[in-house]
Image (cartoon, coloured by chain):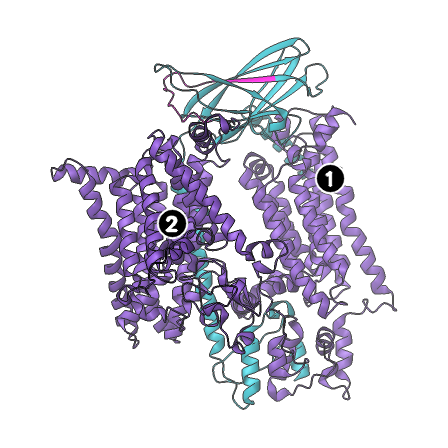
C-alpha cells in the first residue's frame, strides 16, 4: 500500500463527545433490547439490534473516518459522508425499532416518572403524529436537502465546525423522519397505506436526481471552497464536482429505488402477509361478530409480548379500549401488570440479591476490599506518605510548591478525596492513617470511657471544622509546609489520645474535622454500605453488624445496619461486612442524594428533621465551599486589603477572619432561617421552622460538593506538573542515594483553561439540579397540592440559585494562586 | 432556458466572489496557498484564533509539477508576535511534542518561537500540523520552512489573533442547561399532576387505580399509535380513534 493511501486511511478524527454519546445510546438500546428480546423474541430478534448498531456505526464512521478529514478538500468525499448520514444510517437505525428498547433501557423510574408524562401529553402526541405524517416527512427532507446544498449554506458549514455539525445533525434528523413511513418501526402505526410507499420513494428520487444532475452537468464550480482548495490525487475541481454528483445520483438513487421496487413487488404478491395492510386485516377481524375483543390485532400483539397465555378480557365499560391500546402498546409492564391485572404469573420473591450493583460482589475487587488486611495496608501506605510529608515539611525547603507538605495535601490529596467521594464513596476514611493506631491506644490499658453525652452531637465537630477553615486562611496553611507538618502531627496525637481514653470511634464520629467533611460529602456518594436483603436481617438475633462477634468487632460508630440509612457517620471501615454471619451487607449503588428526601429514623442519628447540629454541619460544608474558593479570587483579596487599609490595619488577616466567620456561620444561619420562615409563611403548611431548617439545609449539600470538587480540581490541574519533581527532590533529600527516582519531564494535565471552566460549570450544574430536585421532592411530601409545594419550594430554590450564581462568578475570576503553581489566566 | 440563465447568473456571481473567497479545509481556514521553488504549500488554521487556546496550524506540502503530496518533508513553523506586543511570561511548563509555548520574557523584547509540525499531530495525515497557543491578540507572522530532497523554501503569512470572547459567552451551553432542565422538569410535574387528577366514575376501584397507574406510570406510545384519549376531569374516558371506536 502506498504511503499516501496509508496516510489517508489513518486520517481518523476522534470526537470524544460524539463518540461517548453514541456509546451511551448503544448501551441504553442494548439494555432495553435484552429485556424485550427475553419477553418477545419474535418482535425483537437479534437482527434488529444488529441493524441499530450498524446504523450508529455508520454515523460514527461518517464523522470520524477519513471521509471527514477530506470533506473540506474533496466534494466527492463530502458527498459520500452525506450519503452515509442520509441513506444508510437512518433506515438501519429505524430497522432496529429503537423506540421501545431505548425506553426500556432507561432506568425504570425515570422512564415511568420522567418520560411517561410526556408520552401521554396530548400536545406531544399531536406533534409526533404531525411530524411522522408522510407528507411532512417528505417536505422536511426536501427542504433540508435543498437548503443545505445552497452554496452559501454549504460553504458556511465548511467554514465553521459548529455549523458543520449542525448540518450533519439536520441531515440525520430529517432523513430519520423521511425513512419513518417507509420502515414503519414498531410500534408505530402507518398513516398511509403500504402501496403509497413506492410513490413516496420515487418522489424523493426525483428530487435527488434533480440535484445530482445539477452537480454532475454544471460547467462551473458551485462551491467556492473547493475552487480554492488544493487539488489532490490529480483531480480537477469540476471533475470532483461531477464525481460527487454521480455518487449522489447513482448510489443515492438506488437507496430509493430498490426499496420502492421491493415493496411494490411484495405488495403485488398475494401470499406474503406483509403485503396486506394491517389495517385491512384488522377491519376483517373486527367485522366478524364472533371474534371477541381479545383477538384484535393489538390484543394479539399484547399476548405475544406477555408471558401468560391467558386471554385479555376487556369490557368496554372499563375504558377497555383505552386499556387495550395502552397495554398492547407498552412492553415495559411488569410489576403493575402482575399486581393490578393479574395477567402475568406473580413474581416469586427472590432470595437472590435485589439486583442493585454491589461493589463487594465484583470478582477480585470484592474479596480484596473485604479483607481486614486490605484496610491495614491502605492505612499503612497513607501513614508512610504522612510521615514523608511531616519530614519534608519540618526539614525540607519552606517553599510550598517544592515541598511535599505543600503539594501533596493541598494539591493532590484534597482533589483525590473529593473525586473518590463523588465517584464512589468515603474511601479516605477507609484508609485513614489517623486511626491506624486505634488498637494501640486501647492497649495502653487506660480506662476507656464513653464519649461525654454533652458532646454527642456534631457541634464540637462543627466548631473544629470552622476552626480548621479559619486556620487555613489565617495562617496560610497551603503556603506553610512546616505548619502543615505540625498540623498532621497533632492530628495523629489527638486521634491517639481520644482513642486511648474513649471507646468506640469517638474521634471519627464526634471530633475529626476531616471526618465531618467526609460524612457530609458522602451524603451524595453513589455507594453506600447497606444490607442486601432486609428480610435476612429481620431473622437475625445476634446483630453482629453492631455488636461484633468473637472474630470481628462491629460498627464502631454505632450504626445498626438494618436501620442505617445514608452514609452519615459511616467510615467505610467494612467491619460490619466482615462481622455479618449472613454475608448480607454490601457496598450498594444508590441514587446520589436521594436519601436526603427521606426523614426516616436512622440508626444512631435519629431523624434529620430533629438534628439541628447535622443541619449546621451541612451549612458549614456548603458555605465554606464558596467562601474558601472566593477568598482565592483577586476581587475578594483586593476587597479585604481595601477594608484593612480603610480601618488602618497592618494586615488583612482580621478582615479575612471576620468575613470568614460571617460566611461560615452568620450568613448560612440567617439565609436558611429567612428561607424557612418565608416558605412556611407562603405555603401555610403546618411545619415547624426547625424542621424546615433542618431538612432543607441538607438539600444544599450537592451544590457544596460540586463547588468543592470544582475548586480542588482546579488546583489539581494547575499544580499537576509539580508533583513528581517534588517527590523526587524529597526522596533525594530524605533518603539520599538509597532512593533515587528517575527524572521525568513535568507536564500538565491535557486540559486547557476553557475545558476546566466547562468542567467546573458542569459540576455546578449537576449540584444545582440535584439540590433543586431534592428540595422539590421534600416539598411535595409536605404539600401534595402543586401550588403549595411551589410556595414551599421557592425560597430554597432561590438560595440554591444564588449560590450557583456565586459559584459561576467565582470560577470566572482570576485566581490568586497564593504560592501554588502560577498560571496566567485570561482576564 | 431558465435554468441555464440561473446557472450563468450564478457563474457571474461566483467569478466576482472568487477573489475574496476564503477557502476552508480540514485544518480550518486557508491562510496561504503559494507556489515557490519545487513546492506548493497550503497553510490552514482554526477559523477563529484567540489567545491562550490551542490552535491547530496545518500545512499541506505538494510537488509543484505533479501536485503529489509530499509525506517526508520537514516542516518548521516560526511564529513572531505582533511588533508592539510584549510577551507575557507563562509558567515554565512543558508539553507534548509539537506544542509550542511562549518563551520567557527576555528584557522586554518580543520573543519569536519555533516549533516543528508533524503529520502525527494532524487528523488529516497528509498534512503537517502543530497545536499552538498564542499569547496575545494581534497580527502574528507565521514563517513555514519546508525541506525535502535537498530543497528548502520559506513561506510567510499573517495570522490574526483576535481578543478572546467573554468567558461567560464561552460557557453558555453549560449555563443554559439548568434552565432547560428546570423547565422540562416543571412541565413533567405539571403533566404528572394533571394525570393524577383524572377520575373515572362508574368503574371498579381497582381498574380506576390500574388505569390511572397505567396512564401515569407507564410509557405509552400513543403518539405513534395515533390514538387520542379524551382527558377530562370527572368525565369517563371516551375512546377515540379508528381502532378504539371499533373495539368499544
Q: Return the x and y of residue A739 as percentages of the image width and height.
A: 50, 29
Chain letter for mark 1: A
Is the residue A312 above or below the residue A393 in the image?
Answer: below
* In-image side of A308 versus A731 (left or right): right
Q: Colour of chain A?
A: purple
Q: Give the labeled residue for mark 2.
A: A707
SS assignment at label 1: helix
* In-image side of A475 versus A377 (left or right): left
Q: Residue at x 36, y 19 (%)?
A: B86
Q: Give the labeled residue for mark 1.
A: A213
Q: Residue at x 26, y 50 (%)?
A: A467
Q: Is residue B77 magenta?
A: yes
Q: Residue furthest left?
A: A648
Which residues fall within the magenta stretch?
Answer: B75-93
Q: Return the x and y of residue A738 as percentages of the image width and height.
A: 50, 28
Q: Return the x and y of residue B62 as percentages of the image width and height.
A: 67, 19
SS assignment at label 2: helix
Amino acid at each position: 500500500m502506498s504511503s499516501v493511501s496509508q496516510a489517508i486511511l489513518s486520517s481518523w478524527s476522534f470526537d470524544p463527545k460524539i463518540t461517548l454519546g453514541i456509546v451511551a445510546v448503544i448501551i441504553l438500546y442494548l439494555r432495553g433490547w435484552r429485556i424485550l428480546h427475553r419477553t418477545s423474541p419474535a418482535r425483537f430478534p437479534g437482527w434488529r439490534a444488529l441493524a441499530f448498531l450498524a446504523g450508529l456505526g455508520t454515523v460514527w464512521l461518517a464523522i470520524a473516518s477519513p471521509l471527514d478529514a477530506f470533506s473540506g478538500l474533496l466534494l466527492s468525499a463530502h458527498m459520500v459522508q452525506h450519503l452515509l448520514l442520509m441513506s444508510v444510517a437512518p433506515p438501519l437505525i429505524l430497522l432496529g425499532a429503537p423506540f421501545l428498547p431505548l425506553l426500556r433501557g432507561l432506568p425504570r423510574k425515570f422512564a415511568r416518572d420522567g418520560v411517561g408524562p410526556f408520552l401521554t401529553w396530548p400536545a406531544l402526541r399531536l406533534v409526533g403524529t404531525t411530524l411522522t405524517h408522510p407528507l411532512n416527512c417528505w417536505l422536511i427532507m426536501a427542504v433540508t436537502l435543498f437548503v443545505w446544498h445552497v452554496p452559501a449554506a454549504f460553504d458556511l458549514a465548511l467554514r465553521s465546525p459548529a455549523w458543520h455539525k449542525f448540518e450533519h445533525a439536520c441531515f440525520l434528523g430529517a432523513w430519520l423522519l423521511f425513512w419513518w413511513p417507509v420502515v414503519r418501526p414498531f410500534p408505530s402505526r402507518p398513516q398511509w397505506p403500504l402501496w403509497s410507499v413506492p410513490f413516496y420513494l420515487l418522489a424523493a428520487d426525483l428530487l435527488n436526481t434533480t440535484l445530482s444532475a445539477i452537480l454532475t452537468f454544471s460547467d462551473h464550480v458551485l462551491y467556492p471552497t473547493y475552487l480554492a482548495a488544493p487539488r489532490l490525487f490529480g483531480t480537477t475541481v469540476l471533475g470532483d464536482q461531477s464525481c460527487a454528483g454521480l455518487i449522489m445520483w447513482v448510489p443515492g438513487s438506488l437507496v430509493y429505488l430498490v426499496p420502492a421496487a421491493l415493496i411494490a413487488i411484495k405488495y403485488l404478491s398475494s401470499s406474503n402477509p406483509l403485503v396486506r395492510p394491517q389495517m385491512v386485516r384488522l377491519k376483517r377481524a373486527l367485522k366478524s361478530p364472533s371474534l371477541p375483543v381479545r383477538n384484535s390485532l393489538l390484543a394479539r400483539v399484547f399476548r405475544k409480548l406477555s408471558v401468560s397465555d391467558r386471554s385479555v378480557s376487556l369490557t368496554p365499560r372499563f375504558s377497555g379500549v383505552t386499556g387495550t391500546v395502552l397495554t398492547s402498546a407498552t412492553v415495559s409492564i411488569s410489576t403493575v401488570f402482575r399486581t393490578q391485572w393479574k395477567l402475568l404469573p406473580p413474581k416469586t420473591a427472590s432470595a437472590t440479591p435485589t439486583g442493585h450493583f454491589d461493589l463487594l460482589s465484583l470478582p477480585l475487587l470484592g474479596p480484596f476490599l473485604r479483607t481486614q488486611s486490605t484496610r491495614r495496608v491502605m492505612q499503612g501506605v497513607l501513614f508512610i506518605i504522612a510521615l514523608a510529608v511531616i519530614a519534608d515539611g519540618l526539614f525540607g525547603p519552606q517553599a510550598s510548591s517544592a515541598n511535599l507538605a505543600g503539594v501533596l495535601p493541598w494539591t493532590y490529596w484534597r482533589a483525590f478525596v473529593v473525586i473518590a467521594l463523588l465517584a464512589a464513596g468515603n474511601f479516605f476514611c477507609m484508609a485513614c492513617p489517623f486511626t491506624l493506631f486505634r488498637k494501640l491506644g486501647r492497649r495502653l490499658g487506660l480506662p476507656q470511657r464513653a464519649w461525654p453525652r454533652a458532646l454527642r452531637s456534631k457541634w464540637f465537630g462543627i466548631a473544629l471544622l470552622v476552626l480548621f477553615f479559619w486556620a487555613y486562611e489565617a495562617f496560610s496553611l497551603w503556603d506553610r509546609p512546616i505548619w502543615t507538618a505540625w498540623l498532621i502531627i497533632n492530628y495523629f496525637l489527638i486521634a491517639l489520645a481520644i482513642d486511648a481514653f474513649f471507646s468506640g470511634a469517638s474521634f471519627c464520629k464526634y471530633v475529626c474535622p476531616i471526618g465531618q467533611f467526609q460524612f457530609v460529602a458522602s451524603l451524595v456518594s453513589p455507594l453506600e454500605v447497606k444490607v442486601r436483603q432486609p428480610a435476612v436481617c429481620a431473622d437475625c438475633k445476634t446483630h453482629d453488624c453492631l455488636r461484633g462477634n468473637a472474630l470481628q468487632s462491629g460498627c464502631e460508630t454505632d450504626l445498626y445496619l438494618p436501620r442505617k440509612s445514608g452514609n452519615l457517620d459511616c467510615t467505610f471501615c467494612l467491619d460490619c461486612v466482615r462481622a455479618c454471619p449472613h454475608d448480607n451487607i454490601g457496598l450498594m449503588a444508590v441514587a446520589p442524594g436521594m436519601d436526603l428526601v427521606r426523614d426516616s429514623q436512622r440508626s444512631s442519628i435519629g431523624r434529620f428533621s430533629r438534628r439541628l447540629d447535622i443541619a449546621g454541619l451541612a451549612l458549614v460544608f456548603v458555605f465554606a465551599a464558596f467562601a474558601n474558593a472566593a477568598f482565592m479570587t483577586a476581587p475578594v483579596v483586593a476587597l479585604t486589603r481595601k477594608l484593612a487599609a480603610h480601618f488602618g490595619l497592618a494586615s488583612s488577616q482580621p478582615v479575612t477572619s471576620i468575613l470568614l466567620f460571617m460566611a461560615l456561620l452568620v450568613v448560612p444561619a440567617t439565609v436558611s432561617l429567612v428561607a424557612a420562615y418565608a416558605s412556611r409563611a407562603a405555603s401555610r403548611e403546618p411545619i415547624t421552622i426547625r424542621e424546615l431548617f433542618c431538612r432543607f439545609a441538607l438539600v444544599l449539600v450537592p451544590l457544596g460538593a460540586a463547588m468543592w470538587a470544582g475548586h480542588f480540581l482546579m488546583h489539581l490541574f494547575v499544580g499537576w506538573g509539580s508533583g513528581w519533581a517534588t517527590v523526587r527532590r524529597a526522596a533525594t533529600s530524605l533518603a539520599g542515594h538509597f532512593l533515587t527516582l528517575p527524572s521525568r519531564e513535568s507536564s500538565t494535565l491535557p486540559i486547557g483553561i476553557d475545558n476546566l471552566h466547562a468542567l467546573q460549570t458542569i459540576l455546578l450544574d449537576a449540584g444545582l439540579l440535584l439540590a433543586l430536585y431534592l428540595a422539590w421532592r421534600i416539598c411535595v411530601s409536605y404539600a401534595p397540592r402543586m401550588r403549595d409545594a411551589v410556595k414551599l419550594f421557592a425560597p430554597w430554590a432561590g438560595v440554591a440559585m444564588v449560590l450557583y450564581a456565586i459559584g459561576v462568578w467565582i470560577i470566572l475570576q482570576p485566581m490568586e494562586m497564593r504560592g501554588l503553581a502560577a498560571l496566567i489566566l485570561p482576564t | 432556458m431558465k435554468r441555464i440563465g440561473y446557472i450563468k447568473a450564478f457563474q457571474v456571481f461566483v467569478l466576482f466572489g472568487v477573489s475574496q473567497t476564503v477557502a476552508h479545509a480540514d485544518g480550518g481556514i486557508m491562510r496561504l496557498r503559494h507556489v515557490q521553488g519545487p513546492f506548493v504549500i497550503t497553510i490552514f488554521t482554526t477559523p477563529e484564533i484567540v489567545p491562550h487556546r490551542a490552535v491547530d496550524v496545518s500545512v499541506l506540502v505538494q510537488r509543484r509539477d505533479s501536485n503529489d503530496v509530499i509525506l517526508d518533508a520537514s516542516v518548521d513553523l516560526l511564529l513572531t508576535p505582533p511588533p508592539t506586543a510584549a510577551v507575557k511570561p507563562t509558567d515554565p511548563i512543558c508539553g507534548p511534542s509539537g506544542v509550542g509555548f511562549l518563551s520567557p520574557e527576555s528584557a522586554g523584547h518580543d520573543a519569536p518561537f519555533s516549533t516543528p509540525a508533524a503529520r502525527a499531530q494532524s487528523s488529516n495525515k497528509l498534512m503537517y500540523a502543530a497545536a499552538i497557543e498564542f499569547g496575545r491578540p494581534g497580527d502574528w507572522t507565521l514563517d513555514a520552512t519546508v525541506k525535502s530532497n535537498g530543497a528548502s523554501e520559506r513561506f510567510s503569512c499573517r495570522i490574526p489573533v483576535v481578543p478572546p470572547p467573554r468567558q461567560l459567552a464561552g460557557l453558555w451551553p453549560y449555563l443554559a442547561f439548568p434552565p432547560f432542565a428546570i423547565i422540562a422538569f416543571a412541565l413533567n410535574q405539571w403533566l404528572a399532576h394533571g394525570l393524577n387528577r383524572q377520575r373515572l366514575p362508574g368503574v371498579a376501584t381497582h381498574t380506576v387505580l390500574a388505569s390511572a397507574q397505567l396512564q401515569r406510570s407507564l410509557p405509552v406510545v400513543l403518539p405513534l399509535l395515533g390514538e387520542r384519549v379524551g382527558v377530562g376531569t370527572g368525565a369517563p374516558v371516551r375512546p377515540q380513534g379508528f381502532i378504539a371506536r371499533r373495539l368499544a
